[in-house]
Image (cartoon, coloured by chain):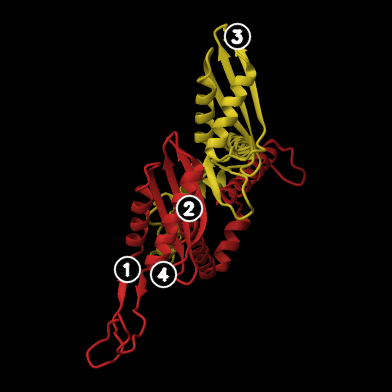
Amino acid sequence: MSGLNRLAAFLLGLVLLALGLLAVVEAVALSVWDESWPIRPLLSWRDDLMTTPWSDWRVWFGGAIAFVVGVAIVIAELRPVRPKRLGTGGAKDDNWMLARRSVESQTADAAASIRGVASAKAVTRGRADHWRLNVTAKTEGDVVDRKDVEDAVHDQLRALGAPEEAPVRVTVRRR
Amino acid sequence: MTVTNRILWIVIGLLLAAAGAAAVLVSAGWMPGTDRDVTLLTDAMSRRWRDWGGWALAGVIVAGVIVAALGIWLMSLELRQRGGRALPTVVFRPAAQAYGDEGRLAAGNGHAAGGRTQVDTSVLSNALKYDLQLDPLVKRASVRLTGSVGKPALYLRLQVTRDADMVAVRANVAAALARFRTTTDLSPTLRETVIKVS
């Protein structure tokens, strides 16, 4: 999401630059030559605006589109975003962080390494400085001790240097 | 930057939604105090524009310059990397040496040795990167030096092996940084180290 935001903001900057320069060029063209350039139809657009009433269906339609797009943007931005990096819970000045995907893939692999576990998935939740891990291990019917999976996950977190107090929830399910 | 971008897009979304809602309400005749039969651009607005004469176009030019500048500022913000600007080229000057100091060089007739060595930041970053990658636990390292010569900062990205012991990785990084400080006489603050396992 943050990558998409950055790209969109960059493109917005590009559009603003283009519009600003265009406005300057148009204003100079109008003041010097009394003619619109480079947007030739600018003056006919002005005439259109002077003959189009607010009740026109295009105004209603355009307004509805703008409303829907605006609401969609707000909803997308308000969705909680999972952090890319997770803190290791060290001292206040400890700035070592773990890539979230690495934590998830390594702990999932650790859970899947337990005999009887067919597949496992790990998902982190929470903030970068205060996160928790949910691991779901799926079996094909074999009996799997949840404690074994938990121990494997905790061992992996320790090896990664993850904080000791990071809550871990392990669920064992049958496929 | 992530938070700033999110706020920017939330504001844009709200403005767009508000403008769209207002347009629909006026168009449908549901907005009190408005007339849906009035044109989008009225004769009064057109007259006022003509009355302003050259000032109107001057205003457009100023607004255009401001909008363009905003666009450039926004693009530069998005292109900025984490940690800010890269450290500028570092210049090393040998300390003045007294003639006859044992074990030290002195120029010609006893005056202090002079000269300067200019080192590009990428050279320093690459040197530290290669040193970090000498550790068998580290598959790949990425180093970013930012700040100023008086207050340098360091951002590291390390891709480590699946069986890497983090205690050992930390110790090796600390040793590499100690060598860097000794060699370059720079003491960058380690701002961030991100570990990725592959």
Whether residue B196 is visible, yes or no, is yes
Assess disc 1: are there few (<14), some (14-19) or many (≥20) residues with their C-alpha within 10 Å of its C-alpha.
some
Q: Looking at the colours in the rendered structure, which chain would you say is drawn in red?
A: B
The lab-note entry on whether marks 1 and 4 share a chain reads yes
**Residue at the top extreme?**
A141
Q: Quadrant of the C terminus of chain B?
A: top left
State if disc 2 and disc 3 touch (CB < 8 Å).
no
What residue is disc 1 on?
B119
Q: Earlier in the sequence, mark 1 or mark 4?
A: 1
Q: Nearer the viewer, mark 1 or mark 4?
A: 4
Q: Position of residue B44 (x, y in %)?
A: 63, 57
What residue is disc 3 on?
A143
Q: Is B121 placed above or below B158 here?
A: below
Q: Is B111 placed above or below A165 here?
A: below
Q: CA distance from mark 1 to mark 4?
A: 13 Å
Q: Earlier in the sequence, mark 2 or mark 4?
A: 2
Assess disc 3: are there few (<14), some (14-19) or many (≥20) residues with their C-alpha within 10 Å of its C-alpha.
few
The amino acid on which the numbered mark 4 sits, given as a three-letter code, is Asp
